[in-house]
Amino acid sequence: MKTIKVGILGLGTVGSGVYELLRKNGDHISTKSGVRIIIEKTADTDVQRKAALGIPDGVFTTAASDVLENPDIDVVVELIGGTTIAKELTVQAIRNGKHIVTANKALLATHGREIFEEVLKSKVELGYEASVGGGIPIIKTIREALIGNTIQKIVAILNGTTNFILTSMTREGLDFRAALEKAQELGFAEADPTLDVSGGDARHKITILSSLAFSSYIDHDRVYVEGIEHISERDMEYADELGFVLKLLAIAEKTEQGVLVRVHPALVSGDDPLAAISWEDNAVMVYSDFLGKSMYYGKGAGAYPTASAIVADIADIAHKVKSDGEYDRYSYVFNRNLPQLPFESSVSRYYLRFHVLDRPGILSKIAGILGKNQISIASVIQKETEEEHEYVPLVMLTHSARESNMKKAVSEINVLDELEGAGVILRVIDEDHS
Amino acid sequence: MKTIKVGILGLGTVGSGVYELLRKNGDHISTKSGVRIIIEKTADTDVQRKAALGIPDGVFTTAASDVLENPDIDVVVELIGGTTIAKELTVQAIRNGKHIVTANKALLATHGREIFEEVLKSKVELGYEASVGGGIPIIKTIREALIGNTIQKIVAILNGTTNFILTSMTREGLDFRAALEKAQELGFAEADPTLDVSGGDARHKITILSSLAFSSYIDHDRVYVEGIEHISERDMEYADELGFVLKLLAIAEKTEQGVLVRVHPALVSGDDPLAAISWEDNAVMVYSDFLGKSMYYGKGAGAYPTASAIVADIADIAHKVKSDGEYDRYSYVFNRNLPQLPFESSVSRYYLRFHVLDRPGILSKIAGILGKNQISIASVIQKETEEEHEYVPLVMLTHSARESNMKKAVSEINVLDELEGAGVILRVIDEDHS
């Protein structure tokens, strides 16, 4: 039977998951795939992990070089994380002729071009299924299953922490702070949740995914990002009244002008399959010319789902290594150089909420400003005055409008005397995501 | 660039879709995959298709043998359908050393063992992504992406016609007959809809899928099947009241005793992602030990989605053909010989509806019979008597029970004097599909 020897860098949550998976299902994998995956060496600075996982003598080391320079090792699994040491070790492994399997989204989103160029210079494969959507096989699907398609758009829920928080807010009426605390207690949010709640993690993932889908390097720093920290229970309630659910979406679309990639909260129609993706789950909806709309759903994080993706990458590499050591690699084509469009050029429907004095004429004043900026109103909810307050919420859905026009209109509305505070702007993603 | 030469048998809807796909996206596929797919020959008995598709001279034939015996052809795409001629041609192609790509679910469900044994004797690959779930990459996902997992259960919507009919019934209050007619008008049901509405098509597909998932040949004839012809609007309404949606599900699960595979209508919890799969769409939910719950959603039929799956199979085969002509095939392991359990041994919750005389004591009588058969009631809806009728509907949800016990209990209830007609039995599939 064909064998492939693996070295694991980093035995944290995911590294331990990979070790456990291969111990439990290794024989089954061999039977099904005809490949035996052997863990030749594991490296971690914490020696206690050797005993915790029951790793045999000789298979554990504290020195990464014992993995990188080991001539027996075919595949290096990089699970250190971060963009400094992980990058050095990855590049070194590639230069040493090792195939790489990685879950490191930050590294690929910010240094992808450099890493892929190293890969292209060598005869190795880079497996990065685990870097996007945890165990969901979205990289393989786009690269292989959708090979006959031109991909037009991706609309995805790529961060479990924020989806958990938004689901708590929607279903349990919690405010952002309380929902975040609940997520932290249950282990779905980290002590410092900034990278997740700011949309930064989803931005890493959509950068990687859209580069692959559109065969063009996407500049991570030019991907628009807006987090969920400012989402209020009030907007959750109005969204619900209007038949929508609030989600943090990562969206990438290709138009004739170029590619537009963005991460922001959005109202999703209640009967859209994405609306049913709850709690810590992730999902990726892909629009392509022949397959049409397809969606891939599952656990976007966690030791076991991520290990599932990593082992699939290793088995794929094993399958493609030929007896003479040659390797028939997927060609990484990121060479289309599509222009990356600014968020201001995006077009969508909008949800607007203003807090206005309950006086005649205010609606027509706001409608006037919107109209002047080529924005037409689709529907309005105006709440009745509660006797003690003179300000009332005014909620609107617009027809499709351009982001730059919307920003201009709302900045004009925000300075009206009849307004209290600034207006809330949220994008609406329709059934057909237009 | 590596090239692969394809012969297509059958230029009906799907065959034409494949031809169009390769014409439109062929260059793009070459750039992305490093493989050029060349249609060397197409065969159809209808010569008019040559002109309709603009097929060049020399690329069209009316004789299948021009494809099967053509030494230049690497891959034969079988799109004839049926289980007689298609089987002969498939076996002949395999024996001639051609790789096979097929969308023929009836053939693989009923003669899979024979076909796969032919494949195992030769050095060819059999690509059958298009046979289950149309363009949804579920075969690839189970075979490759979930290679590290042991699959425990599959719960799937695999037939677009029935899902369309059930969605019409749920959303528009149509009865079965009217919903079927609507589906026929819109092209989502055939003139003879028997194979679809009886559950037969879904049964073909779940047979193929579960054989792969459990590495064991599933006997198609022993897969339980129940169609949707008997579903009434009334049960749709009660299901809705109880927070469920009615779907035709194909379910395959592995227990310690063996494998249980079945197709029947079922109540799905409204917040289950499967409940959001509407109209002609398909979806497959897979439960596995490391990835957990994952779902794959998309178009389960149609020329273009099916062409997308077929071209992915061709590209995969092309990718794995080595320069020396050797082929590193996936090992088809159907050799576990797991016992196939009878439907009567299945366990689930149940929805029951009886039409009973509105008399004191009838509920306790029915509850008594259920209890005697180890079935306990979870909740009851008893409708108020409308003055003109003396019979009222009695709707119940039970806790988990065994199918054989349920059948026995309901047959005892059906002979009660207080009953009008026979009781309706539907299975309930919970959030966690237990």
Image (cartoon, coloured by chain):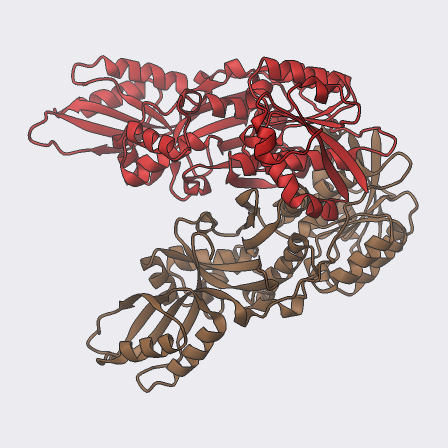
Chain colours: A red, B brown
In the image, is A390 to the left or to the right of B154? Answer: left
Q: Quadrant of residue A410?
A: top left
The residue nearer to you, when weighing A317 against A163, is A317
Q: Quadrant of residue A178?
A: top left
Query: Residue A368 at x, y = what percent?
Result: 25, 20
Query: Residue B34 at x, y = what percent?
Result: 77, 29
Residue at 36% across / 25% down in the picture?
A228
Query: Residue B2 at x, y = what percent?
Result: 84, 31
- Residue A57, above or below B193: above
- Residue A342, above or below A290: above
The residue nearer to you, when weighing B233 against A168, is A168
The answer to whether residue A138 is seen in the rendering is yes
The answer to whether residue A257 is seen in the rendering is no
Query: Residue B326 at x, y = what percent?
Result: 88, 40
Residue at 42% across / 36% down in the picture?
A430
Q: Quadrant of residue A347?
A: top left
The residue nearer to you, when weighing A247 against A300, is A300
- Residue A419, above or below B354: above
Residue at 67% across / 21% down in the picture?
A334
Number of numbered labels in the structure image? 0
The residue most toward the left is: A387
In the image, is A26 to the left or to the right of A358? Answer: right
In the image, is B325 to the left or to the right of A19? Answer: right
